[in-house]
Image (cartoon, grey):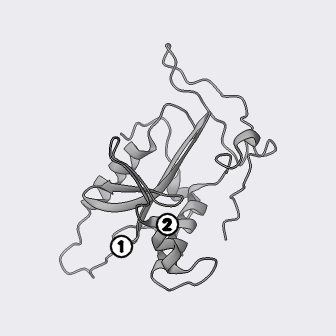
Amino acid sequence: SMTDTKTYMSTDDYGKNLALGYSSLNRDVVREKVNFFNADGIAAAAGFTSNVLDIAKFARWQMKLLASIEKNILLPETLRSMHEVQWDDELTSVTRGLGFGVYNFDGENWVGHGGSCPGYRSQLYINPDKEIAYSVMINSSGTSPTKYIAGIHEILSNVKIKKGEETNPHPFPFSKNNCKKEQFTINESKRLF
């Protein structure tokens, strides 16, 4: 279950389980700490808190449901409808399902959802057909989680299976049983992209 996901932003967790939020870079190229953001006024659209492990569980649940491995809460057909384009703005090329963005990413169909409130940006991309998902969470404004998803995707897409090794349709090192928080820690002093 998603034990670290809440439908609100907790002042008790701020700076502890909930990372401090930071601003966009200012003129001095510095990010300033953002005051705690209370999403009560827009609670229907914002204010969830989570972590990459719980979001990975959410993505995995969707893939299992679509593959009819797991049956609960929604029927697979309902989730498929949510992932299909229900709204298409031809002027901006924005396509939406029900609760999900529908994206043409690297020539393939992906679905996902992003979040943004002062001090935080996040994005989830799921390719149910290939059973791949990416989740990026950044505790600062003025950032692009989608840029990091594209970079991660490019790196992992170039992973090759060595001759003589078993073919693995999922060339990614994280599985349900060996996924640890430490694997998701990034040294903030290094620029990845």
* 12 relative position to 83: left or right: right
Crowd tier of the residue under label 1, counting other residues whose Cα lies within 10 Å: few below 14, some 14–19, many 20 or above: few
Compute the Cα span from label 1 to label 2. 15 Å
Circle 2 SS class: helix
Badges 1 and 2: C-beta atoms under 8 Å apart?
no
Q: Position of residue 6 (x, y in %)?
A: 72, 56
- Residue at the spot 46% in from the left edge and 67% down from the top edge: 174
Query: 104 or 193, which is in the foreground?
Result: 104
Residue closest to the far left: 163
Can the viewer see residue 113 in this picture? yes
- Residue at the spot 24% in from the left edge and 72% down from the top edge: 161
Is 103 rendered above or below residue 168? above
Callout 1, which amino acid? Asp
Is 176 rendered above or below residue 88? below
Screen quadrant of the N terminus = bottom right
Mark 2 = which residue?
82
Point out which mark residue 47 bears.
Answer: none
Mark 1 = which residue?
129
Screen quadrant of the C terminus = top left
Callout 2, which amino acid? Met
- Residue at the spot 64% in from the left edge and 77% down from the top edge: 73
Q: Where is residue 120 in the image (x, y as percent from the top left)?
A: 59, 39
Can the viewer see residue 14 in this picture? no
* 9 relative position to 63: left or right: right
Q: Position of residue 123 (x, y in %)?
A: 49, 50
Which is nearer the N-term, disc 1 or disc 2? 2
* 83 relative position to 16: left or right: left
